[in-house]
Image (tube, rainbow, N blue to C red):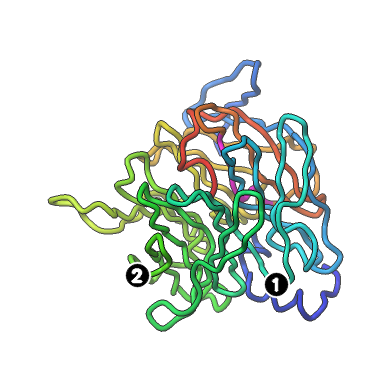
Amino acid sequence: MRRLRNRSLAVLATLGALALTGCGSETYAPGGEAESTASGRTVTARQLMRLTSVHEETGMTLLEGPVFGADGTLNVVDVTAPAGEPKVLRVDVRKKTVRTLYTDSRGAYTSAQFSPYDGRLYLTDISHGEIVSLAPDGSDRRTFFAGEVDGDRMQPDDIAFDPDGRLYVSDALGMAEGEPRGRVVRIGRDGGDATVLAGGLAATNGISFDVDYRGLWISELTENRISYLPVEQRPGAAGRHTAMRVDGGLARTDSIAVDADGNLYQALHGRAAMAVYSKYGERLATVEVPARAEGLESATNVAITPGGTKAYMTVSGPAGGYLYTFDALAKGIRQSNGG
């Protein structure tokens, strides 16, 4: 990687492993034939378009947080975009056009999601420990949350909303130091009442509710582990437990999306692929970019069209930042749209 300017070095030091690190054997292509095996199938994603090139100032580009707005356009963040360059992009996936929705001089935004409470677009700024919100058109930036939670400033990575608009954050605290200090934090819909729901996690990254909003799926980047955390306590219910261990090799577990059938789409940082599991841990499929697609190193997240099965995966590497498409296993819902 080329030498970085001082500001860029500070941002990348905060991003740490998130920015720098990051199966099945049935072959499938839409319209083609597939061969079944015991370990699931391989879904080949198709390139839709390139959104970004590697930035000279930061030496990289890293797309994240795809989320559809009410107008049908797809919003995507570029984590390592330097000051003044597009940090939130708006994509018309039908026309294959992209424009700047928002930029500023300081933020390193790692996720995006619309709130069901106020309809605004929420972004996590991992480098400043803040959560900000925008009007759907990219205007009216507001700081939703900043400051410490139980004595520590957050490193907010991904977010999920419950139906009432409360926000749940995967806090990657301790990632840069390699210490298991990550947390799951719940914040009231007006920005108050920040509460730690779980701690002692290893670089908390992906977070998504299950279909019924009874619990959260959480991934830990440096442990390649997905945990389940109940948030709706029922008689006899246990606490957080390890649900799946992801055999990622050099890749690490990034963001999580959930479809209408409850299947988990686990993004892989360090490999241009996603692992798909049932809610009971069965490996259903692996989504891969074609082997000939060189210079792509990470598939960080996915948005499945609400009410449809068309999926849009953010993929990045030295070749730039791209959108790839594939047919999801089930329809898209709020839990498969942003975060």
Give the mark nearer the N terminus: 2 vs 1.
1
Residue 155: image x %, image y %?
53, 71
Give the percent coordinates (x, y) of residue 269: 62, 54
Above or below residue 148? Residue 253 is: above
Q: Is residue 176 left or right of residue 106?
A: left
Reading the image, the residue beneath label 2 is 193
Q: Would residue 222 be found to the left or right of residue 33 on screen?
A: left
Q: Is residue 218 magenta?
A: no
In the picture as drawn, the residue positioned furthest to the left comes out as: 235
Residue occupying image coordinates x 65% and y 49%: 137
Residue at x 80%, y 44% (from the top left corner): 294
Q: Is residue 247 visible?
A: no
Residue range of the region highlighted in magenta in the rendering = 298-304
> How many angstroms separate mark 2 from mark 1 (CA)?
26 Å
The answer to whether the residue labelled 2 contacts the one labelled 1, judged by CB atoms less than 8 Å apart, is no
Mark 2: amino acid:
Asp
Q: Secondary structure at mark 2?
A: loop
Q: Is residue 88 above or below residue 272?
A: below
Provide the residue designation for mark 1: 106
